[in-house]
Image (tube, helix red, strand yellow):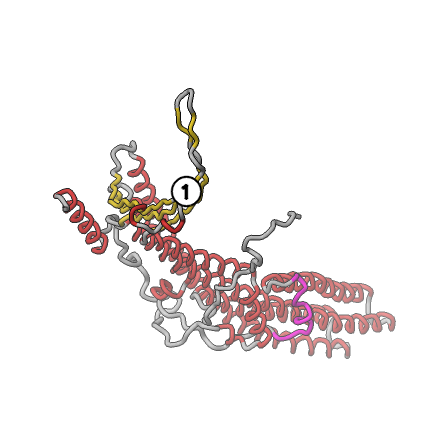
Amino acid sequence: MRGPISRAGSACVALMLGSALAGCAVGPDYAGPPRLALPSHWSSNPASHRDAGRLDRWWLRLRDPLLNRLIEEAVEANPDVAKAKAVVREARVTLQQTAASLFPSVSGTASVTNNKTSAGSSSVLVDSAPYSLHQASFDSSWELDLFGGTQRSIEAAVRGQQSAEEDLRDSLVTLIGDVAAYYVEARGYQARIALAQRTSVSQRDTEKLTRSKYEAGSGNAVDLAKATAQAASTEANVPTYQASLAADIHRLGILLGRPPDGVASLLARSAPVPAPRMPLPTGLPADLLMSRPDVASAERKLAQATAKIGQAEADRYPAVSLTGSVGTSAIRAGDLAKYSSLSWSVGPSITVPVFDAGKRLATVRIAEAQRDQAFATFHSTLLTALEDVENALVSLSRERVRATKLTEAARNYREAARLSRSLFETGSASFIDVLDAERSLYSAEDSLIQSKVSAAKDYIALAKALGGGWSDPVDVSRPIIVDTNTGPHLRETQK
């Protein structure tokens, strides 16, 4: 017959279970991204609005099949992306590990021992017959989450996983932008090398013409020296550009997870600098909260830090556990299941923090300070994102204007060089006019190539600043290293 204490214990257990199921929690509840003052439009684009276009696969707008191929391979093979995938896997398993705390834990033990006892006085010693003792037991424990500490830890783990997924997306945004930027730079150096070589050939022709005039007595040694010097000066640019080209190719190889010269053969043949013509949908500044993965990751870290405050706060409250055990012992294994050999115990236990010299409260204050740090990081990341977009918009807009003027300058210098050379051949113009026209033409055409590269890189920077990147699902389930023979086996000698 159950007495008042037994009934009170049952009522207490029922109350505990009801409280756990009701979702009691301590600590602050995260209410979503903080409300921060954001501009209503971009300063360099007052008419900005929510564009219908998307930033997924923005590099296709550069219309370069080789670049598309390099980006596809980089996403698959880049070591930094592989590391980010592993971090996501770790975060997902951490969530599973944390969620397991909500469930009871059960363990079992079994043993067989050989026994012999002796008994008697100082003069008589009686030995019992040896016997075997079979024992088996099951132990279980379940800590009730009365104040939501485990739920807060699960909440923190969920937000940690979401942050890791955003970090993976951010690594893809950075990788794709870097591949595109280095590719554009490489094409730019190829164009500058070709221009320098083409110009130096023309300048050597001018040198030959000047030498002929000098040998015929109609020229002078000063003009000949200047012609030779100008051609040599232009030729001297080629090795510098070749070294820079090699560095860009080496960096592309590393980004693709290859050796430094892994893509050299793919870029052996020159191609034009990619020139985007389709505008990017800039959207509104507030869109960066979702489109920029680094901003989204910082916001998830803020949410995670908020949940950890509740996790620390719950540790200041009593902890209640239900424990139980079932054991059996018998001389014969077949008797283990008999009721007469069974023993059991079950009941709640409570742990109340009485005095810890402020240790638990300090843990809460630490968590609050870490939440403030996460907020400051989020705020700083968002401001940096706004700055990145504004800078890219201005740079791209101004570079396009500059490219237009440089195109006009190069066209007129080209005509001036043609006319001055023609007049020099007939003796109607001085060599200084030819020298100046050719030098100005080379400078204008070289500046135009650099402007095209800068415009393409500004376009890429804008796409990165807006958070444009990979849109297809990324498989994070495959580990980099697949272990084999992990079961019981003889250990091999370490090398």
Query: Which residue matches tag 1?
Result: 133
Which residue reaches farthest front? 124
Magenta segment main secondary structure: loop
Q: Is residue 27 left or right of residue 251?
A: left
Q: Which of 123 and 442 is in front in this view?
A: 123
Q: Residues within 10 Å of mark 1 (few under 14, many from 20)?
A: some
Relative height, residue 336 to residue 285 (above, below)? above
Residue visible at 14% across and 46% down in the picture: 1
- Residue 134 in which image quadrant: top left
Residue 271 in magenta?
A: yes
Question: Where does residue 440 sit, x and y in percent of width and height?
Answer: 65, 69
Which residue reaches farthest top? 122
Relative height, residue 98 to residue 112 (above, below)? below
Q: In this view, does 232 lie to the left or right of 189?
A: right
Question: Where does residue 354 sit, x and y in percent of width and height?
Answer: 25, 34
Relative height, residue 85 to residue 328 (above, below)? below
Question: Where does residue 125 sit, x and y in percent of width and height?
Answer: 43, 26
Q: Give the residue type at disc 1.
A: Leu
Residue 394 in magenta?
A: no
Which residue reaches farthest left? 4
> What residue span does the magenta drawing correspond to?
259-272
